[in-house]
Image (cartoon, grey):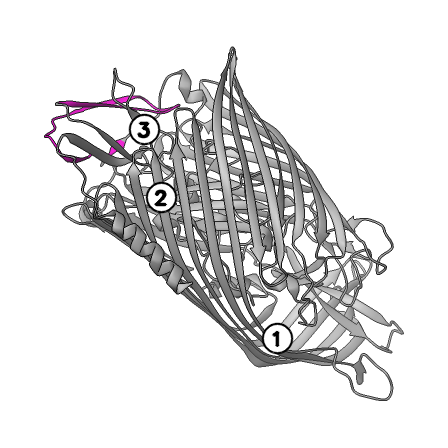
Amino acid sequence: MIRIYNILLLLVFGLTFQIVSGQEQIHISGKVTDSEGLALNLVHISIPGTPYGTISGKDGSYLLKLAYQNPVKLSFSSLGFQTKLITRQASPGENMTINVILLESPEQLEEVQIRESRIEDQGFTRLNMREVKILPSISGDIESYIKTLPGVSSSNELSSQYSVRGGNFDENLIYINDIEVYRPFLIRAGKQEGLSVINSDLVSSVQFSAGGFNASYGDKMASALDIHYRKPEKIGGGFELGLLGASAFFEGISQNSRLSWIVGLRYKSNQYMLNTLDVTGDYKPRFADLQSYLSYTLSDKLSLDFLGNIALNHYNFIPESRQTSFGTLVNSVQLNILFNGQELDKFNTFLGAFSVNYRPTEKLMLKFIASAYSTFEYENYDIEGYYSLNELDKELGSENLGDSIMNIGIGRFIDHARNSFQAYVMAIHHKGNMQFNNSNLSWGIKLQNERIFDRMNEWKMVDSAGYSIPYTGQTVNLREITNIDNELNTIRTSGHLLYKRNFKLPHSSIETEAGIRGHYWSFNNQFLISPRISIMLNPEWEKQVKFRFATGIYFQPAFYKEIRDENGWINNNIKAQRSIHFLAGGILDFRAGNRPFRFSTDIYYKDLKFLIPYKVDNVRIIYSGENNAKGYAAGLEFKINGEFVKGVDSWASLSLMQTREKLTDDSGSGKYYPRPTDQLINFSIFFQDYFPSNPTFKVYLALHIGSGLPVTAPGSVNGEDYFRMPPYRRVDLGFSKILKDKDSTVGGRGIFQYFSTAWISLEVFNLLDINNTISYTWITTVNNLSGQVGEFAVPNYLTSRRINLKLTGNF
């Protein structure tokens, strides 16, 4: 791999030494953004009165090479924005930089441009970074925003992970600057998770697809999140201080505009939130990361980029006690536990990626990427607990209402773990893009080496009323035991070819995307082919309407967790899971009360085969390690967004979904049962408002409602015997006051004169103080005083109501 990478670098650098006769030409480059500084894709840059022109890329950048003329006139146009004409004086052979800000069109075209989202590529929605920053959430990251979109669900505010259209957390792709990124592997609960892998302070553009994405996006079955960090055009920075942590970023550009950099530093401690959990004790979570993105322009054709990330996540916990009441009015029970011991966890990850961008012509772009990712994770705990399970007085009017009246079970347990996980992922990647008059051809090939070292030594002892469980009457047995030492060294190769073309019809236009993706993994010698196609119809109706249909095959080869069974043993015969997507949808842009709105809907069906059944405990996914199931996912989604309050965007989304599977071997009954992500209804609202007499005071509300997820008891062979958690219900409320705005109409005195923008926020998390369940602790009783024998599912609740205060500033 090192030799191949060196050869590629030599070839690319060799291209920079070619002699270009450019004395009679002008090279114009720059970046196109909107009024909020977000990069604009697909902006048409042309020379008025001539056939010469180009379009901007995903990061808003463009390059135009033309014969010498003086003055130079450029036209910048994009649907939903005002066309901008620029005239500049030029000299022969000059390299000009022209950065442009396009303003939204106040005319009829505004119906097409909803600020919250607009279609960048088929099936992708562009997110508004301004609303990411103001959305009231514990994490304050991009994933919190994504959880409000149709098809996306999450029942854990402590975690940045989410499921999409019936898929699990491991089925979501995340790219930063064309580099696939990974999350830690050993994390069991959201309270250990810490910071999102994405630093929203550095982001330029975000695109998200809930399914039906094209062949350029990799080998996962559910969704794709495409992030691009920005290239600064000036020196600046910003910060955020709050009760949950702090962040800061600095950006700049050299005097000759060749070197640009942006660096972000974050620190988070959710101790304040964890102190609301049922388990009391000394929580000491410490999460920090440092991310940087540097870019250097060697010439108008060649540039170099570097992306770096160091994340240090430490979770220390000394539990003391727990008291949880659960059940119904008819059967109310309370669990009490006294603890000894502690937990010490570390999840440290490192990422470095170097890319070379070469544009030999204005229509051809070549990119070469070399990346290295490593993770070092350690999970160590020895926790002893003494528990009692008691029935509570439930008689209304009783003096002892809510007090313990009968012991149901007593016992003791010990949890022990000495686990370590190390992974090294090194890759070289080439991507290319060729633009034609009304079509586009892109391709990519990737070679990746994965080395994994997984060592687990954990066990659980349970004693109930003096009896070791499982009870045999002869020996003392452990309830659970795992002792493994796995190593893996594999090569993975993948590639894609994607063709896009636009067709003009008499009363409409059609946009098509057709592509094919290939994948090979040395672990199981499986070669996969994934064809995908998407069609968008744009009728020339009075109303702005679009219709889309997409279908394709989406294979998900295992990474590591999928090949390991519940006991940690590796299945060398594992195969890739497969999903065939069928999707149809539409978008309607309209005006109501002279304000822009967008209504969108999707209906989809996924045919799932070669599935690896799994269980979910908090955020930990435990796979069976066998391709012994098939299933389906089907759903219907609606979303409406726009200016319910003039000048600010709000939205509501509703998702209806069902996902089922059944075992294909002899271990099941042959009946379909719900998959762990089967959530029939998911409803989200994000609403903004302000005081009409003082618009600098704003209010934000985020509401989430999701029906209960299925749960099975420990030791169950399959998911046929299940019950459902209570529904997830949560309301977060935020208030903000602008202290300084960028137009200097507010603030500008005292310390705020040094800032371009500044505001203070007050957030109320879990406004209604609802006890949401994330998982269950299972208590087994043997020969208890009431004569009951069995297991009790004790709910593990999420966080209670909390208030957070934040101060944010940019300069």
Query: Where residue 292 sits: x, y (%)?
Result: 32, 56
- Foreground disc of the pair 3, 1: 3
3D distance between C-alphas at marks 3 and 1: 65 Å
Which residue position is annotated with label 3?
Answer: 54
* Secondary structure of the residue carrying numbered label 3: strand
- Foreground disc of the pair 1, 2: 2
Q: Which mark is residue 77?
A: none
* Secondary structure of the residue carrying numbered label 2: strand
Quadrant location of the N terminus in the rendered image? bottom left
Task: Classify residue 624 as left or right of residue 78.
Answer: right
Front residue of 790 and 602: 602
Which residue position is annotated with label 2?
Answer: 366
Front residue of 650 and 282: 650
Question: Is residue 624 magenta-colored?
Answer: no
Query: Where residue 759 sits: x, y (%)?
Result: 32, 45
Residue 652 visible in rendering? yes
Vertical side of 508 occupied by 487: above or below:
below
Query: Where residue 206 sits: x, y (%)?
Result: 43, 42
Label 1: few (<14), some (14–19) or many (≥20) C-alpha neighbours in 10 Å:
some
Which residue position is annotated with label 1?
Answer: 321
3D distance between C-alphas at marks 1 and 2: 59 Å
Labels 3 and 1 touching (C-beta < 8 A) = no
Q: Residue furthest right?
A: 787
Query: Where residue 744 sits: x, y (%)?
Result: 22, 36
**Number of callouts in the render?**
3
Q: Residue at x 41, y 16 (%)?
A: 108
Label 3: few (<14), some (14–19) or many (≥20) C-alpha neighbours in 10 Å:
many
Quarter of the figure with residue 775: bottom right
What are the residue bounds of the magenta stretch? 71-100
Task: Classify residue 225 as left or right of residue 34.
Answer: right
At label 3, the amino acid type is Thr
Vertical side of 459 occupied by 191: above or below:
above
